[in-house]
Amino acid sequence: MTAKIFSVLVLLATAFLGSTLGAVTWTATPFNPASVPLAVRSPYLSAWLAQGSGTALNGAWPTFWTGSILGWAGFIKVDGVSFSFLGVPSVPGTTFNKATQKSASFTSTQSKFVLSAGAIDLTVTFLSPVEPHDLSKQSMPFSYMSLSAVSTDGRTHTVQLYSDISAEWVSGDNSLGATWSTATGNTFVHQVQLANQVVYSERNDHIQQGSAYYATSNVAGTTFQTGADVTVRAQFLNNGRLPNTQDTNFRAIQDNWPVFAFAHDLGSVGSTAQSRVIALGHARDPAVQYIIANNGRQDRSLFFFSQFATARDALLSFLGDFNDALTRANAFDAQFNSDASKISSDYASIVALSIRQAFGATEITISKRADGSFNTDDALVFMKEISSDGNTNTVDVIFPAWPILLYTNPVLGKFLLAGLFEYQASGQYPNRWSVHDLGAHYPMAIGHNDGRDEAMPVEESGNMLIMTLSYTQKTGDTSLISTYTSLLDQWTQFLISDSLIPANQISTDDFAGPLANQTNLAIKGIVGIGAMAEISRLLGDTTKASNYSFKEPNRLKFGLKAIATSFVQQWQNLAISSDRRHLTLAYGDSASWGLSYNLFADKLLKLNLFPTSIFQMQTAWYKTVAQPFGVPLDTRHTYTKSDWEIWTAGIMTDQAARDLFISSVRKWASDGLSSAIGDWYETTNGNPEGFRARPVVGGHLALLVL
Ligand SMILES: *[C@@H]1O[C@H](CO)[C@@H](O)[C@H](O)[C@H]1NC(C)=O
Ligand SMILES: *[C@@H]1O[C@H](CO)[C@@H](O)[C@H](O)[C@H]1NC(C)=O
């Protein structure tokens, strides 16, 4: 992961927000986060409401994760009086009020806003489903907005609703030309795309391929229109309905801003809520280009294409499924909340905020057989390293996110690792350690046949071994370890030669710089060797298992010569500070220390390689060095990472230390100093560093998988 220029952007955004926004005037449950997920389902369907210290749903435009605007406007008319409820449209020649936001809340899958417009309360629910056990549904890059109006004064009122999206949803460059169309029938579907698409190509992190969709059921009172934003919005504000006409003057996104709108006349609304649902999304085909043998290229499609001929067919099915999807989402939210609340309510709130963000960086794909039919036995998951490098399937980004896969469905983790295994087993990657990623630019997974990927040799080799054993332990499925035994052992040999005394290199926290003899990196390597011992045991190779590591209770009696066991002994002599109060950041530097989050893997895999005394020492130490917003990542800086804070919470031997980490992350997440949800921040004052919307927040689930 690399910081690049995003820290600059975030700092600018923060300065701007700090000067313009006031305090939150509504009830926020469980808290007011830096950014509220609105429609977050894929690297290219990623719409948020940036918050800072508090922005109502009608206080700013929704934005893509980069911060660029996504036009998405909403109005409600109550007894002829107009109010805006979504976005900040300006419509010359008309007058309208702003609805007043009363509350905002989020769960794992939903963000909900209640706004009052005269005597009507409008509930706007943004549902981005998470369907870890249904590959087709999870692969659909679609989301819901439901609008529900109810009278609050015991009387009935006439109510009309309006919403639209702009063509900003299809490109990162608003000077580009777009085309669009509207399908009518039982359902109205607006579809918009770039006039000149470029497959697999991004501009400002938006994909330059595929279409955006905006769809609703054609029930009585539903009307549509496409056209210039001010024209279409004025049409509704003046008339309460739209003329069912299409603007066919195709033009640039920013040329008289074409918008794609629906109006819903709810008629007379009393104390029974009246609701309408809109489905929206962004889909493309093919989705990912993937390297196969002999430097070949394979075009892969989103999984749902195995069940639907077109993205529009899938969208119609998705729209019709709303009631069931909501029931499933509520059950999913309740399960998560119940499990996470057993740790604490602070923890449950952090987890709820992390789920859509983590899954929103992933896509499930399949290949085609020679006859053109889809091969659903060949599922591969791809993850974009959003905001740092934009790489595809970065091993040290999958690794911190791993707990969310382990908890929700480890098979998705297998499909994420499978592409990395297949590629390296093809023999095209020349290094003896594990590759860093499958491709420099998402959505291309075309490998690094020159071997010049960002080198993190100990980090990635250890990560692959740890995740592979973790998957195998969780599922009992030995297919990965039996198919890729020699690759796993190759990486283990590298760790045996290079992890006790790690050379000068970077770890996953590459922004902190390279360093020799990193204590925490050595832990990762040793746990990796221990993982291979266990993998060998599961495969029946007891000689290798005993050579690499002895299992308790024989470790102390017989096993000191086993490699991982002996490394732990030697490592203790190298890694503990001279006053024996803490682990160092690097061997020999007794004044240094850092988060030893890699010990979490020893616990996760139940290897028990490292003695309890080490965990106890770290627990006592962190209590003495915590800053107001948590424990710094290491002594080189005062910043930290929220994912590693929670991983470290998982290795604490007492609850007070564990809760210190949890409450620090919760305090940062709700501090109002950022407009975007990152994972890298200052422990002294809670200010954001770079990084936003990254999948590593899946690591916030670490305490649920121990
Ligand atoms: C790393 O630690 C080993 C063992 O203490 C030492 O021999 C070596 O010089 C150290 N390397 C560096 C670059 O400091
Ligand atoms: C143990 O593993 C090491 C590293 O692979 C190897 O060099 C050594 O020969 C092995 N020892 C035995 C007894 O198999």
Image (spheres, rainbow, N blue to C red):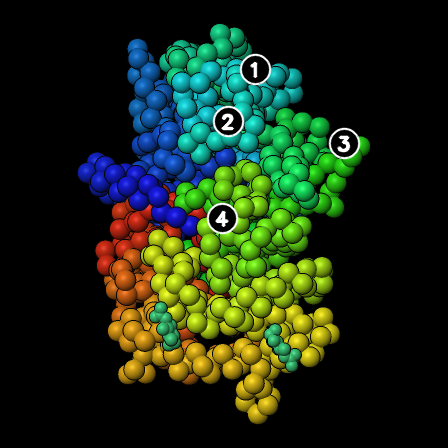
- Decide which of tag 3 and tag 4 comes sooner along the chain: 3
Specify whether 367 is left or right of 556.
right
Specify whether 613 is left or right of 481.
left
**Amino acid identity at mark 2:** Gln
Q: Mark 1 and mark 3 in contact (Cβ < 8 Å)? A: no
**Amino acid identity at mark 3:** Gly
The crowding category of the residue bearing disc 4, from other C-alpha atoms within 10 Å (few below 14, some 14 to 19, many at least 20), is: few
Work out how far the residue at label 3 is from the one at label 1, CA to CA, in angstroms: 28 Å
Tell me the residue that label 1 is attached to: 181
Residue nearest the observer in this picture, 241 or 363: 363
Image location of residue 17, percent across then percent down: 25, 38
Which of the four quarters of the rendered structure image does ligand 2 lie in?
A: bottom right
Q: Nearer the viewer, mark 1 or mark 4?
A: 4
Report the residue at 22% width, 40% height from top: 15
Work out how far the residue at label 2 is from the one at label 1, CA to CA, in angstroms: 18 Å
Task: Report helix, strand or loop for mark 1.
Answer: strand
Q: Is residue 352 above or below residue 281?
A: below
Residue nearest the observer in this picture, 601 or 136: 601
Q: Is residue 403 visible?
A: no
* Residue 200 placement: quadrant: top right
Q: Is residue 562 above or below residue 692?
A: below
Work out how far the residue at label 4 is from the one at label 2, CA to CA, in angstroms: 27 Å
Tell me the residue that label 4 is attached to: 452
- Decide which of tag 3 and tag 1 comes sooner along the chain: 1
Q: Mark 1 and mark 2 in contact (Cβ < 8 Å)? A: no
